[in-house]
Amino acid sequence: MEAPGNIGVRQEDEKRNGIIFGNATGVSVFMKQVLVRGGKVEVHELPVPTASAGSALVRVHCSMISSGTESSFVSEGGVTSYAMKKAKDPLNIEKVKRKLATIGLKGTIDIVRNKLFEFQTPGYSAAGTIIECGDGLQGFRTGDRVACAGVGHASHAEYDVVPQQLLTPVPDGVSFEEAAFVAIGAIAMQGVRQTTPTLGETVVVMGLGLVGQITVQIARAAGCHVIGSDPVAARRELAIRFGADAACAPGELSAVTNEWTAGYGADAVIVCAASKDSVVTQAALDLCRQKGRVIVVGAVGMQLVREPMYMKELDFRLSCSYGPGRYDLGYEEKGLDYPIGYVRWTEGRNMAEFLRMIADKRVDVKPLISVVKPIAQAAEAYKAILDKDSNTIAALIAYGGENEQAAPPPERRLLVKPKNPVTNQVGVAVIGAGGFASAFHLPNTAKMPEARLEAVVDVAGAKAKQAAEKYGARYCTTDYREVLADGRVQAVIIATRHNMHKPLAIAAAEAGKHVFVEKPLAITVPDCEEVCAAVEKAGVLLSVGFNRRFSKFSQQAKALLPRMHGPKMILYRCNAGALPTGHWATDPVEGGGRIVGEGVHFFDFCCWLLGQDPIDIRADRIDANTQMIIPSDNLSVTMRFPDGSLATVVYCAIGHPSISKEYIEIAGGNTTIVIDNFMGIRFGGLPEKNVHQKTEHKGQYELLENFIKAIRGEGELSVTARHGLRATQIAQEALRKCHNP
């Protein structure tokens, strides 16, 4: 280990200095991306992302602004208006209440402020050319013209990383401008499919905005008579141009429908309008014939009167965005397609069919394009969309650069703080700029006297840049290999999803970097053993994020243990709460499950407190007869230790959130110590004074400080890779011993 004042830094790293880094031509190769912060549209320069497994890196040529979805977080009134919208959300109100109860007023204010000013990445419909294929990508190759969909994927950016199921080839004869409508087209396609139209039926389309205009064309192509309705005359005229048999104002719709159907009513009504109240939806029920169908595509109120639906025996459906697969992470993120024999029209197949209809001249989107702006003028494009007096239906952002041969290679590192001198501090890079890293690792590193934040890494360039700017990192990057090759970086903090802990930790160790890994060390025992072997071979330090050891209350309890004679009884109860279905932490591959992902905290704590490894483990879990309860998220694990002590960890996901999350009771020698949610400590049979404070103290700063000081030779490393291995061993053994559900 190098002495504190002689931490080796390769000065040649500073010489990568074309425009930003290493571009001798002086041509910027970073990407521009539209971001929204505090309700305001901004254009930022960001590092280019890399193609992940099962995805493609697409050089975007055109993207489309949605007047509906994207306007929800864009506000002409700026931060004040945006904040008011967020403050009225009942879910946000409840979240704030819970935070106030656990971390206090100051911590809650910090979180709210961060949320208001964090980058939003608008966009979900685009088209461009594949320039890089990730491992396992099937059916596509470099150079393919593709259309892209998906929030967080098809963003308004010069480069997008898009998973396989959200890509579709662009047919010959279809321009990038036309293909950029792919997501909106798929939404309209799915809405029409939900009506199960037959030749000659009469379909009413309520709302003739972007989705409504395309819906008119698709319903017409399906052989239906179409009646459109919208308060804007220009939109009604456009619908007639697209083949609608009639188009009228909402107040005239009932009479027109009765006239066209000889009084029977419409066979189907597709609601494409957006309205907070239920007037539009209720009107749709009234327009239908006996046994007709109402399909809701737009965001409308749903406080409905039962009578019309009951008397007519109506079929009432909600259409889910692009179609089957939407919001299914297995489909969208992991590439798991539905068998065509069971799900004929997935969102991907809807996207492809919409583009085919454009190629066949059965759908025309060109007349819908009102505004086309280069990305530098994105704010003007948004302004046109948000202008209530404007007839703008669709606005496009154009990126140019269709000559792929002349395009320079993408740059994945962006300098943020050029004048960051080399000191005897430990240079640190944080890999993963998500919620936990932003709440703890980044601010803790930034304020630690012995550390120097060199870089922030995240697959999302916007997150990486915002974190780097806020916490004073020298640069941000979307590629972790940049920091492993950086001589100014001596240590990395890995705060990614759990399945990435092992490969990143091993790669960092092999690069000679000291490693801090958030828990768990790895998901499986063999993976943990591989990490331990790599660290020991490389001769670097590795610490694991078992921060609860470093809480001042934990330290006090451990110091008092010698006065608690004889074997101890420990109860560690975690009121974890339920996670949404499909959450990555519950995925056995990505997160390892909650016992491996979070339970290791509590197993490690008990072992550390007693200073022993368990000699026996017993476990049991709830038998659930409902899918709403996950058995492995509700279990009791009892560890027996060599001195006769017992420690029981109760992990519970079915409790009420008003009850504190973590409760620890330590008993022995006719004395008791209670730690309540790391906000206070109480004593029974001991003279120490009870303490209660308004905020949690879970030792995150102190744990990181121990790691950094150990690197500097200023103390021993308290948490090692072997401790991480032990905790995962206990978690896996507990799961093995639980009876089958």
Image: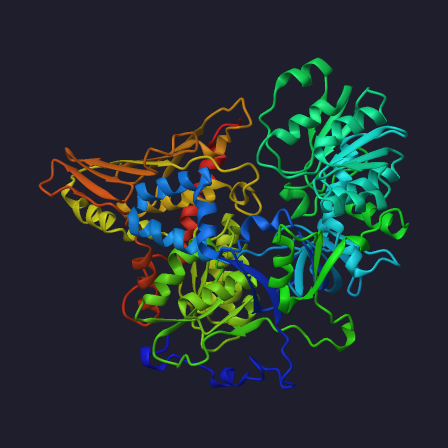
Q: Position of residue 228 (x, y in %)?
A: 78, 37
Q: What residue is shown at x 39% (from left), y 52% (from top)?
A: 111
Q: Nearer the viewer, residue 336 or 712?
A: 336
Q: What residue is shown at x 65% (from left), y 15% (from top)?
A: 307
In the depicted structure, whether residue 132 falls above or below residue 186: below
Q: Which quarter of the picture shows residue 127?
A: bottom right
In the depicted structure, whether residue 288 falls above or below residue 707: above
In the depicted structure, whether residue 436 falls above or below residue 375: above
Q: Nearer the viewer, residue 460 or 85?
A: 85
Residue found at the far top of this picture: 311
Q: Position of residue 101 (x, y in %)?
A: 31, 41
In the displayed structure image, the side of residue 156 where residue 215 appears, left or right: right
Q: Position of residue 200 (x, y in %)?
A: 90, 29
Q: Nearer the viewer, residue 360 or 570?
A: 360
In the depicted structure, whether residue 699 falls above or below residue 133: above
Residue found at the far left of this picture: 687
Q: Which quarter of the picture shows residue 635?
A: top left
In the displayed structure image, the side of residue 283 where residue 220 appears, left or right: right
For the question of whether residue 140 can be seen, the reply is: no
Q: What residue is shown at x 48% (from left), y 64% (from top)?
A: 466
Which quadrant does the N terminus fall into?
bottom left
Judging from the image, the colouring scheme is: rainbow
Q: Position of residue 504 (x, y in %)?
A: 52, 61
In the displayed structure image, the side of residue 438 where residue 364 appears, left or right: right
Q: What is the tally of numbered marks visible in this picture?
A: 0
For the question of whether residue 727 can be seen, the reply is: yes
